[in-house]
Image: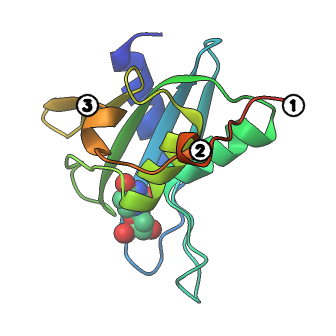
C-alpha cells in the first residue's frame, strides 16, 4: 500500500460523506499495521454535536473490528462539488489517534486537488499531549 493508493482510497471514501449542514465533504483511509485499510467519511446530524469526522469514523470502524495497530491515515476534504483542499484533522480526532497510535511513527497524510501533499508525524500535530501513558494505563489486553 503506497501513499498514492491510500490517498485514492480516502478520495473514494469521501464520496460517501453525509454533510448536509456544512457541505464540507471529508474522506479518510486508515492503514492498519497488518495492511488492512479502513475507510471513513464525515457523518453529520441535524442536532450538530452527534456529527462524526471522517477520521474517527475510520478509527471506530477499525477498533470495532478488533484492530488497534495503525501505520498511517490519508485525509482529503473540500466543499461539496468543489476542489480538494489540504484538510488537517481536528483536535478531537488527533486525541483519538493518540489513544491507538505511536505518535513517533504514525503518519498523517493530506492531499489537495493539485497533487500537493503534506505529511506529519502525529507527535508533531499533538505536542504536549495527554494520553493513556499519563494515567499509567495502557490499551493492551489485560
Ligand atoms: N471534518 C472532518 O470530517 N475531518 C476533518 O479533518 C475536518 C472536519 C468534518 C466535520 C464536519 O462534518 C465538516 O467536516 C465541517 O467541519
Can residue 56 be seen in this snapshot? yes
141 to the left or right of 17? right
Q: x, y (%) of residue 59?
A: 61, 42
Residues at badges 1 and 3 in contact (C-beta under 8 Å)? no
Q: How is the image coloured?
A: rainbow
The residue that mark 3 highlights is 120
Residue 126 in which image quadrant:
top left
Q: Quadrant of residue 23?
A: bottom left
Measured Cα–Cα span from mark 2 to mark 1: 14 Å
- Residue 132's disc is 2
The residue tagged with tag 3: helix, strand or loop? strand
Q: Earlier in the sequence, mark 1 or mark 3?
A: 3
- Toward the viewer: 133 or 1? 133
Q: Which mark is residue 142?
A: 1
Residue 15 seen in render:
no
Residue ID at (59%, 89%): 47
Q: 54 or 72: which is nearer to us? A: 72
Mark 2 CB lies closer than 8 A to ligand 1: no
Residue 122 placement (x, y as % from top left): 35, 35
Sequence-wise first label, 2 or 1: 2
Indicate the position of residue 141 as horizontal and vertical percent values.
83, 29
Q: Earlier in the sequence, mark 3 or mark 2?
A: 3
Q: Nearer the viewer, residue 121 or 113?
A: 121
- Write the residue at 63% across / 23% down: 69
Mark-to-mark CA distance, 3 and 2: 22 Å
Name the residue: 67% across, 47% down.
Answer: 60
Q: Residues within 10 Å of mark 1 (few under 14, many from 20)?
A: few
- Name the outermost residue toward the right: 142
Amino acid at each position: 500500500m503506497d501513499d498514492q493508493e491510500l490517498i485514492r482510497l480516502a478520495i473514494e471514501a469521501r464520496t460517501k460523506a453525509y454533510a448536509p449542514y456544512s457541505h464540507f465533504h471529508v474522506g479518510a483511509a486508515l492503514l492498519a499495521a497488518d495492511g488492512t485499510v479502513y475507510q471513513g467519511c464525515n457523518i453529520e446530524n441535524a442536532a450538530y454535536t452527534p456529527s462524526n469526522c471522517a477520521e474517527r469514523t475510520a478509527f471506530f470502524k477499525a477498533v470495532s473490528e478488533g484492530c488497534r495497530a495503525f501505520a498511517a491515515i490519508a485525509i482529503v476534504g473540500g466543499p461539496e462539488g468543489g476542489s480538494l483542499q489540504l484538510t488537517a484533522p481536528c483536535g478531537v480526532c488527533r486525541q483519538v489517534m493518540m489513544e491507538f497510535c505511536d505518535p513517533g511513527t504514525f503518519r498523517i497524510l493530506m492531499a489537495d486537488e493539485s497533487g500537493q501533499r503534506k505529511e506529519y508525524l502525529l507527535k508533531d500535530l499533538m505536542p504536549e499531549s495527554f494520553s493513556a501513558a499519563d494515567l499509567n494505563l495502557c490499551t493492551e489486553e489485560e
